[in-house]
């Protein structure tokens, strides 16, 4: 409800660029930073722990990433998967990118990878009948749990 009631952002700014430049990582839900990209919690999660890996450089398509950016994004995706597995013990994990509106991209002009933890039976009647997802944990609590796991799961390229 806090999100729905808040003042709307200008469409002239990029939410990922704003988050990456912000000083308060917890408030911006920025979980991890490498030199090239960062992990941020999805504010519209499909499931608890839904992460996004975003390059700092504002690039609209996967094919516009440099070789170093592409490699680092994949290294950080691997790290995100390890964090999710250690923190939430999901049954499986989806990793992917939505490139273009027809593919389901909600933010078209800043490429990003999704990491979604999945559990057997995690789809319920709310999704089927009303197109609504039920998320059982506040984003800040999820952030704190993942941040707490980071000491036990060091980044390894």
Image (tube, rainbow, N blue to C red):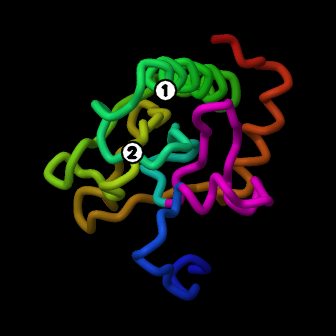
Q: Residue at left 79%, top 28%? A: 150
Work out whether residue 67 or residue 103 is closer to the camera in this orientation and state it. Answer: 67
- Reading the image, the residue beneath label 1 is 69
Q: Quadrant of the C terminus?
A: top right
Residue 108's image quarter?
bottom left
Query: What percent of the width, then of the height, locates residue 35?
Result: 67, 31
Q: Which residues are magenta?
A: 17-43
Q: Residue at left 78%, top 39%? A: 147
Residue 79's image quarter?
top right
Q: CA–CA distance between discs 2 and 1? A: 11 Å
- Reading the image, the residue beneath label 2 is 59
Q: Within 10 angstroms of label 2, few (less than 14), some, or many (20 or more) residues?
A: some
150 w.r.t. 104: above or below: above
Residue farthest to the left, as pictured: 102
Q: Is residue 51 visible?
A: no
Q: Residue at left 58%, top 25%? A: 76
* CB under 8 Å between discs 2 and 1: yes
Which element carries disc 1, helix, strand or loop? helix
State yes or no: residue 115 in magenta: no
The circle on residue 108 is none
Q: Quadrant of the N terminus?
A: bottom right
Q: Residue at left 14%, top 51%? A: 102
């Amino acid at each position: 409800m806090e999100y729905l009631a808040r003042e709307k952002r200008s469409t002239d700014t990029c939410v990922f660029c704003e988050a990456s430049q912000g000083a308060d990582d917890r408030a911006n839900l920025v979980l991890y930073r490498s030199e090239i990209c960062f992990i941020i919690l999805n504010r519209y999660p499909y499931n608890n722990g839904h992460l996004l890996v975003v390059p700092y450089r504002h690039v609209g398509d996967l094919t516009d990433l440099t070789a170093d950016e592409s490699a680092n994004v994949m290294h950080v995706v691997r790290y995100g998967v390890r964090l999710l597995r250690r923190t939430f013990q999901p049954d499986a994990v989806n990793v992917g990118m939505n490139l273009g509106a027809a593919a389901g991209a909600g933010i078209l002009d800043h490429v990003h990878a999704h990491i979604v933890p999945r559990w057997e039976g995690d789809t319920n009647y709310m999704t089927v009948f009303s197109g609504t997802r039920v998320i059982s944990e506040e984003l800040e609590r999820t952030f704190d749990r993942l941040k707490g796991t980071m000491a036990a799961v060091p980044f390894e390229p």
